[in-house]
Amino acid sequence: MLKRLLTAFLAVLMGLVPAFVMAQDSDTSPEKPQMRIAVDFDLTKDRDNILFLDLSNGARVAIRLMPDWAPNHVKRIKELTRAGFYDGVIFHRVIDGFMAQTGDPTGTGQGGSDLPDLKAEFNPMPHVRGTVSMARASDPDSANSQFFIVFYPRFSLDRRYTNFGRVISGMDGVDAIARGEPPENPTRILQASIASDNKPQKMPGAADADAEDITADMLSNSDSQ
């Protein structure tokens, strides 16, 4: 009797297993897209998402933009960069051991672009050394054009400010940015560009040197006595 009951139980169980497997196979719900976490430090890869900052201290800083983390903020940075918005802008707030902030054409920390403010894109990416994040006012949705580069890890900023990139080359140039709020002799962005646009590095004093060369040439070829 017991053997007969056990055989019947196994038969029922075996009948349920295929149905369970079929139910699993029929679940075709799409998976959520995975956020790309790793930062590629290769300057030859995905050059449309590398931002160059040519600084007045002679450094060229390369920043890997991460549209997976903050697509609208990356789009804004690229749009302003290609419009020449950041050219000539100073680092107006630089706190030793913390960060260097720029992106305000007035140099006061109160200015921005004429474009509308951005909705926050807070993400779980940590604020480590070299992180590039968007500055904002007290309103989470008030980021516009200003951004900062972190000197040392500041995890208290995580999920409170929009982390959109990382320095992948030239961090020594970031370390050399003049400190102060504002600095007495502020470091300036001579030129901001996107790597895929292939703009040559702009060096400090280059424009003045060119002007001086032209003037000297004109004088040396002058007929005046």
Image (cartoon, rainbow, N blue to C red):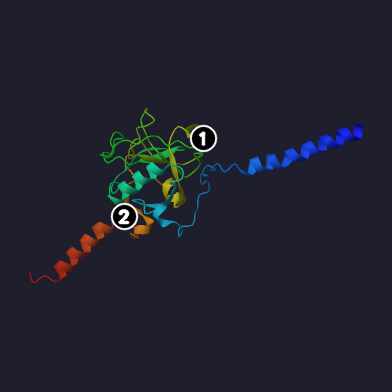
Which is more foreground, mark 1 or mark 2? 1
Q: Answer above or below: position of 14 versus 205.
A: above
**Residue type beneath disc 2:** Pro
In the picture, the quarter occupied by the C terminus is bottom left
* Label pair 1/2, CB-CB below 8 angstroms: no
Residue holding disc 1: 155
Q: Which mark is residue 204?
A: 2
The extreme left residue here reads: 224
- Residue 178 visible from this viewpoint: no
Would you call the spot at circle 2 few (<14 residues within 10 Å), some (14-19), or many (20 or more)? some
Q: Residue at x 91, y 32 (%)?
A: 2
Label located before the other in sequence (1 or 2): 1
Q: Residue at x 14, y 67 (%)?
A: 219
Q: Residue at x 43, y 35 (%)?
A: 161
In the picture, the quarter occupied by the N terminus is top right
- Residue 171 visible from this viewpoint: yes
Q: Answer above or below: position of 47 versus 179.
A: below
Would you call the spot at circle 1 few (<14 residues within 10 Å), some (14-19), or many (20 or more)? few
Name the one closer to the observer, 139 or 53: 139
Assign a secondary structure to mark 2. loop
Q: Position of residue 130 (x, y in %)?
A: 47, 45
Across the whole image, how many numbered discs are drawn on residues? 2
Q: Position of residue 136 (x, y in %)?
A: 37, 33
**Residue type beneath disc 1:** Phe
Q: Quadrant of residue 92?
A: top left
Q: Position of residue 208 (x, y in %)?
A: 24, 57
Q: Which mark is residue 31?
A: none
Q: Position of residue 79 (x, y in %)?
A: 31, 48
Assign a secondary structure to mark 1. helix
